[in-house]
Amino acid sequence: MQMQVVTLFPEMVKTVVQFGVVGRAVERGILALHCEDPREHTTDNHRTVDDRPYGGGPGMVMKYEPVSAALKTARKAMPEGSPVVCLSPQGAVFDQATAKRYAELPGIILLAGRYEGIDERLLESEVDEELSLGDFVLSGGEIAAMAVIDAVVRLLPGVLGDEESAKQDSFMQGLLDHPHYTRPEDLDGQRVPEVLLSGDHARIAKWRYQQALGRTYMRRPDLIEKLELNDEQQLLLDLYLKESDIN
Ligand code: 9D3
């Protein structure tokens, strides 16, 4: 897959993609990632990329022309059918379904803004989608772009090992994870749950599933609503709630 990030801070993006799962995908040739800096597409002596907002008010706006020129260069290097996705607080909230959709594409161009935002005419004429990470304030689109890159690259064939890939389409889909424990068995009286030491794999699987259901219900009721539990799941959840004296 090919990715391009249009950003005033290419070093920020390039540094992060050297590490971990994404770094390995680049080394293996599964991902090619390039950055295009709008500042390299300015024509004035000051290399101006921002200007004051029409109508007044605080902050600056990213100018149309340098961003447009950077996008044009990025597009030339990309396969047909690579959308331009702008990271912005006004976007739809990024989720795993969107990550899966992007992982099917030959390429994607991510546009990360700085300042108060980008001239609206650029969004209208050159951007296919706007994405947000959620309702909190970042200083720019770069960290959001890196989050999208990470989430998408994990889904590309050959990036994760077999075991981790299998986990992705397991029966725990749509639920929070169950708790994890490793040695020692006893930390000053904080013991690992007995069931995990039992060696009874069916009992362990059922316990983990129940924990996942219970924790999701307590922490993310919105996810439980989306799932619409069947009778068996509802029973397992009721038992969890009875055993942990909440509710
Ligand atoms: C404090 C500035 N805000 C005035 C109402 C507007 C604003 C402009 C630019 C807020 C944030 C930003 C920069 N943010 C992003 O580019 C961004 C972002 C985010 O801030 N939160 C969640 N997801 C994203 S994706 C891109």
Image: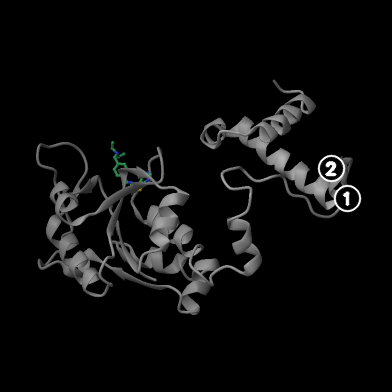
Q: Write down the residue under mark 1.
A: 197
| Residue located 88% across and 53% down the image | 199
The image shows residue 190, relative to residue 41, as above or below, that is above
Q: Position of residue 132 (x, y in %)?
A: 36, 45
Residue 116 found in image quarter: top left
Question: CA separation, marks 2 and 1?
Answer: 7 Å
Residue bearing mark 2:
193
Nearer to me, 169 or 20: 169
Amino acid at pointer 2: Pro
> Mark 1 Cα within 10 Å, few/some/many (few <14, many 20+)?
few
Q: Residue furthest front?
A: 231
Residue 80 locus on image (x, y percent): 25, 70
* Quadrant location of the C terminus in the rendered image: top right
Vertical placement of residue 219 versus 161, above or below: above
Question: Is residue 214 in view from this perspective?
Answer: no
Name the spot of residue 115 as percent of width and height, x first. Answer: 26, 48
Front-most of residues 35 and 215: 215
Disc marking residue 57: none
* Quarter containing the N terminus: bottom left
Measured as percent of width and height from the top left, residue 190 is found at 85, 41
In the image, what residue occupies the spot 51% across and 63% down?
154
The residue nearer to you, when weighing 243 against 49, is 243
162 relative to 155 in the view: left or right: right
Q: Is residue 7 left or right of residue 189?
A: left
Q: Amino acid at mark 1?
A: Leu
Q: Secondary structure at mark 2?
A: loop
Determine the secondary structure under disc 1: helix
- Disc 2 vs disc 1: Cβ atoms closer than 8 Å? yes
Between 4 and 214, the residue placed more toward the observer is: 214
